[in-house]
Image (cartoon, grey):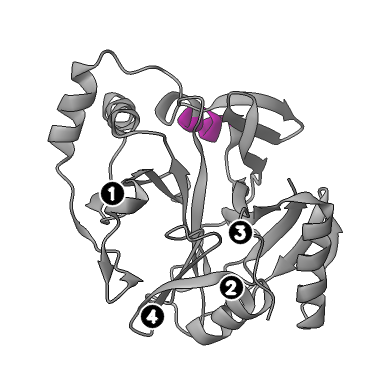
Amino acid sequence: MMSIDPSAAIGGVRLRVSDLERSLTFYTAVLGFEILSRDAGQASLGVDGRALVALRAMPSAIPRPRRTTGLYHFAILVPSRTDLGHALARVLAARWPLQGASDHGVSEALYLGDPDGIGIEIYRDRPRAEWPMRDGALDMVTDPLDVQAMLDQALAEGRPPDRLPAHTRMGHVHLQVRDIREAERFYHGALGFDVMQRMAASALFLSAGGYHHHVGLNTWGVAGAPPQPEHSPGLDYFRLTIAGEAGLRATRDALTGAGVPLEWRDGGWLARDPSSNAVLLTAG
């Protein structure tokens, strides 16, 4: 089995949205992205000139049915706890509903949904030396996060900026799948991600290079479910960036050897997991 390039990372996500203008307002005014380009029903947003979120308008979209596989959330990684507090301040100032806030041991995280209900996490990492371990293995948890203390600390350092900080990046994606074992065969067996943590038989976290997770998988409420319709708001694909053309070819060949169909699209190789979640492999 091939091991994935240890420097592999999530480069960004491409999303289907029902109302482009409404989504642009949310992603800029509430989250703090900048618009990098827009043209004919599409837009690219990012930070410091780097594209992280692409939006594709689908005006006739229907709501995603509840019991379907697809994107659980994509996760925006900010550099520091102060930056996370500033992100929280922007959300609260916009009176946008916060869906949750958790301390995962490896990170502190905020959760919300965009205007179409697409799940979003904003988080900051703790230093690796502080990550909780049990019997030599990673032991992520879900504990309450004191958001007021974090907000107070951030505001004590000054007024929140209107934009996300320069070193913000896409940290991970979390997907809903119909079956954990078949998803593991794709992401671990074919793509070569390392398994970092299992949660019973319903969730799995995988990564490259020892990170806590680049890809999260769960079957919560969707075991055996069909994919979400392609004409509903959600994930077109997430970009997985591999170092160099040789690394990209090796990853492509591993998928081909595992019998995974590939399609050249948008400057990379598009593959789908068994639940039809799409990943675009690109050289970085």
From the top left corner, tell me how far across and down residue 251 is, in percent.
76, 66
User: What kind of element bears circle 3?
Assistant: loop
Residue 115 appears in the figure = no
Residue 240 appears in the figure = yes
Q: Is residue 32 left or right of residue 5?
A: left
Residue denoted by label 3: 6
Residue denoted by label 1: 99
User: What kind of element bears circle 1?
Assistant: loop
Residue denoted by label 4: 202
The answer to whether the residues at label 3 and label 1 have Cβ atoms under 8 Å apart is: no
From the top left corner, tell me how far across and down residue 270 is, in percent.
76, 62
Q: CA distance from mark 2 to mark 4?
A: 17 Å
- Compared to residue 14, the image places residue 202 above or below, namely below
Residue denoted by label 2: 227
Give the number of the mark in front: 4 or 1: 4
Marks 3 and 1, the one that precedes in the sequence: 3
Please give the name of the residue rendered at 76% of the width and 74% of the height, measured from the top-left corner: 255
